[in-house]
Image (cartoon, rainbow, N blue to C red):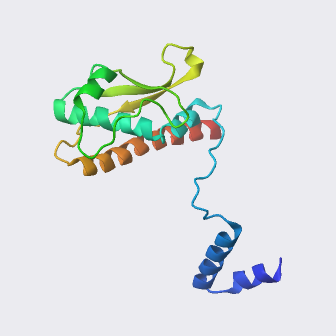
Amino acid sequence: MTTLSRRACQAPASTMLATAALACLLAGCDSGEAPAPLPPSDDPVARTFDLSRDPAVVDLGRRVAWYYAHGGRLPADLKEVRAFVQVPGWPALPETTRAGQAVTYRPTGERAFEIVVGDPAGPAGDRTAIAVHLPETVPNDLGPEAFATWWELEFIRQQAARLQERLEQLGG
């Protein structure tokens, strides 16, 4: 153990926090640049979780949820989403992920749908379907900004639950 690390262990919490922040800044961990993305996982659940954080995926899911909240049903297809979900303050719906993969939509039930990332006509191994199930009550009285926040939390909750289930399967 170095002298610096021995002193850090003996220092009060506020000093340790300041030391850690300074060390981080000196090491360049707050460069303002986004960290390099991790390589895609071989595990389909982990890959789905990674893709669920892409802005195009989140935005498409939010628009489908908005359509459902204000129309009482899921849209029939992506064309219907693009045609009828024009919400002030929301940017245009991206057609691809940050990595350039196509993002499409398909309903799978009364309140269930998939966001498909990759070529929908290509081999199954070249695309990932992200399953989404809208809860019994989707708020229809929120403004666009509040609804967007609600959706991000709901979507993350669903994907984290699937990832947790997978981790438990792998753990035994």
Instruction: Report which quarter residue 109 is drawn in.
Output: top left
Is residue 37 depicted above or below 130 in this figure? below
Quadrant where the N terminus is found in the figure: bottom right
Instruction: Report which quarter residue 11 is drawn in.
Output: bottom right
Quadrant where the C terminus is found in the figure: top right
Q: Is residue 61 visible?
A: yes
Instruction: Report which quarter residue 115 is drawn in.
Output: top left
User: Front-most of 46 and 122?
Assistant: 122
User: Front-most of 124 and 13?
Assistant: 124
Horizontally, residue 48 falls left or right of residue 145, namely right
Is residue 86 depicted above or below 110 in this figure? below
Is residue 35 depicted above or below 69 in this figure? below
Instruction: Give x and y (percent) for residue 19.
Output: 65, 79
Instruction: Give x and y (percent) for residue 32.
Output: 57, 61
Is residue 102 depicted above or below 159 in this figure? above
**Which residue is found at the position 69% from the left and 72% from the top?**
26
**Which residue is found at the position 22% from the left and 29% from the top?**
84
Instruction: Give x and y (percent) for residue 44.
Output: 58, 30
Horizontally, residue 124 falls left or right of residue 71, namely right
**Which residue is found at the position 48% from the left and 42% from the top?**
53
Horizontally, residue 97 falls left or right of residue 19, namely left
Q: Is residue 172 visible?
A: no
